[in-house]
Image (cartoon, rainbow, N blue to C red):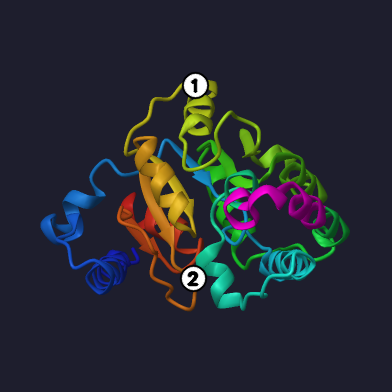
Amino acid sequence: MVAIFPKFQQTYVSAMRESQNFETEVDRLPISTMYNGMLPEAVIFDWDNTLVDTWPCIIHTMNTTLKAMGQDTWSLEEAKVRIAQSLRDSFPKMFGDQWTKARDFFYAELEACHLDMLRVLPNTLETLQFFEDKQIPIAVVSNKTGPYLRDEIQHLGWEQRFSFVAGAGDFEKDKPAPDPIFHFLKKVNLAPSRKIWFVGDSSVDVEIAHNGGCTSVFLQGEKGVIFPQNREPHFVIQDCSELPVLLSDATC
């Protein structure tokens, strides 16, 4: 048995204290209590930079659009802070009444590069296979525009891995609205609960988990980026490889 939860506890508590200084659930509950009943009935993943590395394409496409619209370009660090909402939610705020023109620039550039630049993150396949072997339904809910999201999943040959896929524009509202979560859970005959895990790397992923009544698992990444929002996740991990290790440990 691999005792990894103290690592989760330490990472989570330090992140919380650095960002908000509030008392955390992990502070209040012993490890045994946190494990009790936490095996997921289903796992929902974000897509970009959770299961696949799309930052090179995103930053290239975004900066091409910013240049075309006469705005300053962003560094990768700036992009990681600023990019979370869907295009239809973020571009009107950024470009005003010119947002549809910016949208067209963005989509044209994205179509030219997103499949060629798509890279699977380390340990992703092993993580997905773990959940498949456990017969735990897995889904993807992303703020990437739906057709592009499905093109990328098809490009990787992963159509059969997911019970449900939803991208931006597939529902009336995009993340952090919980509509895709409810639709997925209805499809697999489950109800919102802490036994449904939402795994993602951005603030909207934490928000949608709370909005959907699920457990939030925040993927912090190797640089230890602190999530910029007021609603805290239930767990913080460095990458998806820690999920099956945690679950294996919990079932020992």
In depth, the one of 219 and 97 nearer the eye is 97
Instruction: Please state the horizontal and vertical placement of residue 18, each as a whole percent of the image.
Output: 26, 74
Q: Residue furthest left?
A: 28
Check if mark 2's residue and mark 1's residue have beta carbons within 8 Å.
no
Image position of 143 with respect to 180: above or below: below
Q: Which residue is mark 1?
A: 186
Instruction: Tell me, yes or no, if residue 93 can be seen here.
Output: yes
Left or right: residue 104 versus residue 186 is right
Tell me which corner region of the image, top left, top right, bottom left or bottom right, holds residue 89: top right
Instruction: Please state the horizontal and vertical placement of residue 195, each as a whole percent of the image.
Output: 35, 38
Q: Earlier in the sequence, mark 2 or mark 1?
A: 1
Tell me which corner region of the image, top left, top right, bottom left or bottom right, holds residue 15: bottom left
Residue at 72 percent across and 46 percent down: it is 149
Instruction: Please state the horizontal and vertical placement of residue 12, each as a whole percent of the image.
Output: 29, 66
Q: Which residue is mark 2?
A: 221
Q: Secondary structure at mark 2?
A: loop
Instruction: Tell me, yes or no, if residue 156 can be seen here.
Output: no
Residue at 64 percent across and 44 percent down: it is 88
Which portion, as a residue range, is magenta? Answer: 91-107
Residue at 11 percent across and 57 percent down: it is 28
Q: Residue furthest front?
A: 97
Residue type (three-letter) at the residue carrying disc 1: Lys
Image position of 89 with respect to 223: above or below: above
Q: Residue furthest right?
A: 112
Residue type (three-letter) at the residue carrying disc 2: Gly
Query: Disc 2 and disc 1: Cα gap in Å?
Result: 31 Å
